[in-house]
Amino acid sequence: MVRLTVAQATVRFLANQWSERDGVEQRLVAGCFGIFGHGNVAGVGQALLEAELDDPDSLPYWMARNEQGAVHAAAAYARMRNRLQTLAVTASIGPGATNMVTGAALATVNRLPVLLLPGDIFATRVSAPVLQQLEDPTSYDVSVNDAFRPVSRFFDRVWRPEQLPAALLGAMRVLTDPVETGAVTLALPQDVQAEAHDWPEELFVKRVWHVARPVPEPAAVLRAVAAIQSATRPLVVSGGGTIYAEATDALRSFAEATGVPVAETQAGKGSLPYDHPLSLGAVGSTGTTAANAIAREADLVIGVGTRYSDFTTASRTAFAHPDVTFVNLNVAGFDAAKQAGTALVADARAGLAALQDGLAGWRVDPAYSAKATELAQQWDAVVEEAYHLGHQPQPAQSEVIGAVNDVSEPRDVVVCAAGSMPGDLHKLWRTRDPKDYHVEYGYSCMGYEIAGGVGVRMACPDRDVFVLVGDGSYLMMAQELVTAVQEGIKVIVVLVQNHGFASIGALSEELGSQRFGTAYRYRGDSGRLDGPKLPIDLAANAESLGVHVLRTTTVEELRTALAKAKQHTGGPVMVHIETDPLVPAPDSESWWDVPVAEVSTLDTITEARRTYDTRKTDQRPYL
């Protein structure tokens, strides 16, 4: 037996957990972010200190500046490691814990494993109500940490030391399950953290968690093959599951063997290089005209590792063929059954290999493949033009994307999350590597960008990381720049200053709401926010945090600064540029369902409602 506190036992256990897939082992929990308060400083904090003094590599600790940002960094780390590794995050009871709830939701929505260790109320209830405790008059065992339950894939509160082993093993099971994974929360009452207990030694031996590649049921393969062979215009829609399963080579082989073109979701972008003859690029509301044109005519959609979000399906208008059917290859039965599709429940790589074997000798009409290639080339010409608009006096956002794409190397990573930038990146970014595109669009969380960029760089220190962030997201959460300064983590932050919320501004205008409440302006004489622009200098803000800043005003200056930033060593760099938010990216010829007021005194709203009612008629039930 080994006598340790609950917190010490937790840290020692985590340091000995490993994941394995395809014969490759790696530490499952590669380290821990944390911010300490009274709810965890003497428990998990003390245990991490002791571990660092004993062996700094056992479970490294990094200081964060915002608990939500720490969870974002952990999620980004896990995504870059294809969910085979993650980080833990510890926070104090109360606001420290609840700050993590948004990060937990993001991880669960995107099916990314993160381990959260919030402090909790006293199990003994002797000191109650403790500082920052929410008192529930209906139950003494409710705390703010119960807010984690709906956004966690596994939640447990360790009221007694004896409960810890089962909680830890349950947490590891979910973290390593490709179907069940997401945020895992172990709430640790602050008195229990410091309580000593005699633990069996076998709790702390090296434990390897095997990440499976489920193979498809033979009968399901036959059904899927028959459905594909009956189609004349099939289309693959590749999602994040293709990337996480490391199935991009299998997808390329499948496409080349069958001639079926490939479109990509946000999470699946990079499934094929942008210049592959069968790559159509992004599909859906933020898609390319090439992918959306093929999608409209497709009589069969082969979904690989996608959950069919409303952006992917353009709110169920993208796949317009009257007899369209679906074959869904997904490790999760829940997603495989969507759109009333023929379900093929399996790992993406194993499933694609089985489909290719079953389709041996079968190909689509070469003219169909050639049409897809031609449409993709036409779109790439549109991208080239968007990259080099020469808009004056301020460049368009598409020109910023083009500059970053041109300066970056194939293995560099672009990071983004919210605003107009993700949609523009989805359709315009030229992917060259399965991991060079990292856009969080499942939760579209403002503030993810910089924290996520830190996590990406920690996961792949041999790649330059370009964080594209607008002024709105920057103001939401830029604190992890200080973490990057402290740890010498090099991220290249491209701050696009457009003085407001450009994405919602454009959507507001489209829906007739006249960009109301979306610009950073003083309140004018009218009493409305229509006065002069606010004199916000975010470059100066970053500089005050210790970031090396390069200011630019033109695309030429931007390209020069980006090249300098790639050569910079010793921490984060910011490249600042102002853009014109009124210059749109090329149209995707698609739609997104955002309801418009049915009655209004404003003509702009009335007209937008007429357009909305027309587009609603295009929606399909996919039954």
Image (cartoon, grey):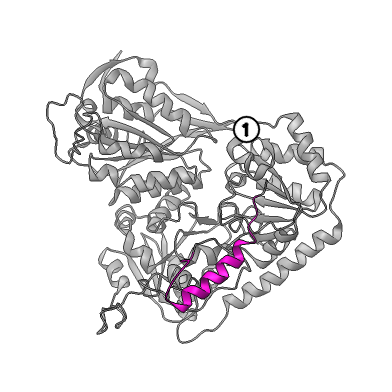
How dense is the environment of label 1, judged by Cα within 10 Å: few (below 14), some, or many (20 and up)? some
Q: Nearer the viewer, residue 222 or 428?
A: 222
Does any portion of residue 191 appear in the rendered image?
yes
Q: Which residues are magenta?
A: 596-621
Give, as a three-letter code, the residue at label 1. Arg
Give the image location of residue 212, x and y in percent: 59, 30
Give the image location of residue 144, x and y in percent: 26, 39
Q: In the rendered view, would you say 361 is above or below 179?
A: below
Residue placed under numbered mark 1 in the picture: 213
Give the image location of residue 170, x and y in percent: 42, 26
Q: Decide whether residue 472 is among the magenta residues.
A: no
In the picture, measured across the screen, residue 163 lies left or right of residue 77, that is left
Does any portion of residue 332 appear in the rendered image?
no
Q: In the rendered view, would you say 121 is above or below 308?
A: above
Q: Measuring 42% from the left and 53% from the top, which residue is drawn there?
A: 452
Q: Residue furthest top?
A: 1
Q: Measuring 44% from the left and 23% from the top, which residue is drawn there?
A: 206
**Which SS class for mark 1?**
loop
Tell how many labels.
Answer: 1
